[in-house]
Image (cartoon, helix red, strand yellow):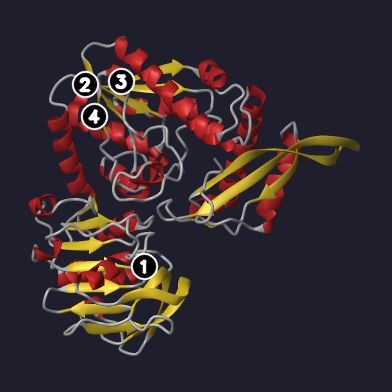
Amino acid sequence: MILVLDFGSQYTQLIARRVREARVYCEILPCTVDVEQVAKRQPQGIILSGGPASVYVPSAPKLAQGILEIGVPVFGICYGMNILNVSAGASVARAERREYGRTPVEILDNQDLFRGFPVGCEITVWMSHGDRMESLPAGWTLLARSQNAPIQAFRDPTKRLFGVQFHPEVVHSERGSELLSNFVLGVCGAKPDWTPGSFIEQAVARIREEAPEGRVICGLSGGVDSTVAAALLHRAIGERLTCIFVDNGLLRDGDRAMVEESLAHLGLDIRTVDAGDRFLASLDGIIDPEVKRKRIGNLFVEIFEEASNTLEDVRFLAQGTLYPDVIESISVRGPSATIKTHHNVGGLPERMKLKLIEPLRELFKDEVRAVGRDLGLAEELIAREPFPGPGLAVRIVGPVDRERVARVRAADAIVRDELKRSGESRRIWQGFAVLLPVQTVGVQGDERTYDEVIALRVVESQDGMTADWARLSHDTLETIARRITNEVRGVNRVVYDISSKPPATIEWE
């Protein structure tokens, strides 16, 4: 097992992902964790993440005392590298020129981290730093350099400390996964034995331990996350599970029928609650996206509470929360920034008197899909593109009402239909319509119109943490735009969002 200590980087979860891609189990802990908690887990290696601070800022996070004395290899990335440098008395200073984005780095040593890399070769890596090392402590070895930063990577052979200034976990870093695998498998000697099957075995045991008796209710949306969570829970506790499907009136076209028909064969006890009017009423006059998310989240809790009161011996509420939801909502690990609130993150009100079970909380979307396949779920359920818990409300910028929901639902159905018809859906992560609070002049049927705008958002991604806009064919874009302006009343213009994540998010709200 490998431990990642989080110093506040938005990339920390990607480190865990890359380690797991090497089939080695990995956990993330805050940088503030004490040495006893680290030692208790008996890690084979430790990775120190990057972070937004400079090591010289008084409030900058520090490495807990005793971590470097545990006796396992330690690998520092960016800020983590500088932490190791400072702990050894090396000089770290503000760089004359910061390094951001893609940067060539020359490899000077092909042992350990860079095993299999030709000496003298250049690789393109992803940089995001303002500090740089000025010197190496005695006995340390220089492994790589760049034009702006003469020390890009090092090795301390005595204590088995390693560091790189760049971010190998980011997909833009050439051979970054190979570098991390070299550390995890080569330096640490970890065995590649973590698989979806092993996760299922461990998760089932953990669920049975967390919920040895009593009924569990599971919030079921029909999406990949909640479906896999429900299947996992059913395997663990069987008939003690009751799934609550809430039709919040903000679902995509056909979603309710799919949930009620497709999931019935799993043998799940599914109770449907028709709450569309209540959700629309709660959103009346609300424009701020954070308020929308919180209103929706609070109402979901109310409905689950009402549902639990109709059942006997309910003691637990289960959710399909994933790690990307957590990292964007609250800093549960290190001092990272909050991006946006997710309705299923943050715990439950005390009045519910229920304990929360989140069996997928530490997984990424692609890992959830792999677990679902191992559980024997149908591919049509596993391959569904992500859909936010708050539904179409977060795809309506501005006020939410019945008319605008119907408008974006109709546009969204066209987007999905045409992406599937063209074959483009096979390569994308998400594709959907966003309704903007903008009216523009148009000409439809030889008449002047003053109607709203639909933005198309279609992205490619591996895990949802970073994303790039999809280069759809012009024919597909033209067909989508023509159908929306012809078939969706109240829309006279369609635009295409070509922003990447970061700096944008995938969803607009």
89 shown above or below 426: below
Q: Which residue is mark 4?
A: 234
The label nearer to you, 1 versus 2, is: 1
Badge 2 crowding class, 10 Å Cα cut-off, few under 14, some 14 to 19, many 20 or more, is: some
Marks 1 and 2, how far apart at CA:
46 Å
Q: Which residue is mark 3?
A: 269
Query: Mark 1 or mark 2: which comes first in sequence?
Result: 1
Image mark for residue 239: 2
Task: Give the quadrant of the C terminus.
Answer: top right
Marks 3 and 2, how far apart at CA:
8 Å
The label nearer to you, 4 versus 1, is: 1
- Answer whether labels 2 and 4 touch (C-beta < 8 Å): no
277 shown above or below 291: above
Query: Where does residue 282 sit, x and y in percent of width and height?
Result: 53, 20
Q: Which residue is mark 1?
A: 167
Q: Secondary structure at mark 3?
A: loop
Marks 4 and 1, how far apart at CA:
39 Å
Task: Give the quadrant of the N terminus.
Answer: bottom left
182 shown above or below 31: below
Marks 3 and 1, how far apart at CA:
46 Å
Query: Mark 4 or mark 1: which comes first in sequence?
Result: 1
Looking at the rendered structure, the kind of residue marked 3 is Asp
Q: Is residue 261 left or right of residue 1?
A: right
Residue 271 shows in this picture = no
Q: Secondary structure at mark 4?
A: helix
Badge 4 crowding class, 10 Å Cα cut-off, few under 14, some 14 to 19, many 20 or more, is: many
- Answer whether labels 3 and 2 touch (C-beta < 8 Å): yes
